[in-house]
Image (tube, rainbow, N blue to C red):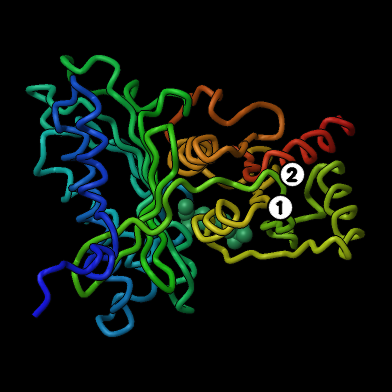
Amino acid sequence: MTSSLPPSDAILPGITLDQHLLRRQRHIPEATGDFTGLFQQLTLAAKVIASRVRRAGLTNQLGTTGEVNVQGEVVQKLDDLANATILQSIDNGRFVGIAASEELPDPVIFDAARGRGKYALVFDPLDGSGNLDVNGTTGTIFAIFKRLHPLETPSLKDVLQPGSALVAAGYVVYGSSTIFVYSTGKGLYGFTYDPSLGEFFLSHPEISIPHHGKTYSLNEANAAKWHPGMRRWLKDAKGRASEGWSLRYSGAMVADVHRVFLKGGMFAYPAEAERPLGKLRLLCEAAPIAFLARAAGGLATDGRAPILDVQPKTLHQRTPLFVGSTAVIEDVMAALSRDE
Ligand code: AHM
Ligand code: MG
């Protein structure tokens, strides 16, 4: 028997999400551990949702609840389950004072009497849930603000902050594997879930969005309703097919954005003639994705202004969204401004 140990990566697949958070926390002398505690609650929720999504076809969890949510959209059974999972995961802790979900008309206030919980959480529990019935990819998106007045009872104001005020954001992709991606503003990190060990391991250190990219992800069936500049940009890109442009669109923003973050290109849900603010939600979808894009060297705009600068007026406010490689987004913005 040899006394030398094998290299550590021959035993462990890498550092865990917990270890990663703790190492970063050590560099912040004033850290209380609340942030790490909140992330532990979120990763627990991600594991539970991933497990439910994987087994949904066996547990009568596919299909709709028969209800329509505050967005006017049909609620899938797993939308409800994912929403309840996240709320339960954070309710037993003291870190979140107020949480707002895409699925709920109003924010949930925790422990209002004592005004505890210095963070405000906004989330889309199961993005792209229309994909569930066809075994397509779905995801969870989350955004974390510091509450404006942590000693006071939490209120809607804690949530109605611009993306530039976020302290962290992330998403979980429930795809061929489960991947948890997060940033606190500097660096974007991805962790792949090993279900046999019940741990997320660092698999994508320092994700950096390529400056250029040749993939566009948008629902082209809506093109007739878009701004003429957007239509022309797309026509030009298609005319340059020999340059290698490809269309990839999954119906789940998280899946499409994850591709764009890794390979470059653009995800967009533009404004439409009868829907000038597009479809996606500013707070629980666009702002966190814009925050992550900036951390990885990319751009996100509503076509006029950076998404991160937009001050939300209402909880479920919508926004057009163009996000991805800097060169592509700048090109699209130029096309949009030419036809104003
Ligand atoms: P959801 O949060 O209710 O699932 O809606 C958001 C989703 C995005 O994930 C996706 O990019 C978009 O809606 C797809 O919309 P469409 O079917 O109009 O292309
Ligand atoms: Mg969504």
Q: Residue at x 90, y 59 (%)?
A: 240
Residue 214 appears left or right of 130: right
The quarter of the rendered structure image containing the N terminus is bottom left
265, above or below 271, in the image? below
Disc 1 + disc 2, Cβ < 8 Å: yes
Query: Which of these two is toward me, 268 or 192?
Result: 192
Query: Which of these two is toward me, 99 or 19?
Result: 19
Residue at the disc numbered 1: 213
Q: For residue 328, which numbered disc appears in the image?
A: 2
Query: Which of these two is toward me, 29 or 140?
Result: 29
**Considering only order in the chain, which callout, 2 or 1, is on the residue closer to the N terminus?**
1
Q: Quadrant of residue 172?
A: bottom left
Q: Quadrant of residue 135?
A: bottom left
How far apart are the alpha carbons under marks 1 and 2? 7 Å
Q: Under 8 Å from ligand 1: the CB of mark 2?
A: no
Where does the image place residue 82, in percent across and percent down from the top left? 29, 59
Q: Secondary structure at mark 1?
A: loop
Q: Residue at x 26, y 62 (%)?
A: 81
286, above or below 220, in the image? above
Any part of residue 124 in sight: yes
Amino acid carrying mark 1 in the image: Gly
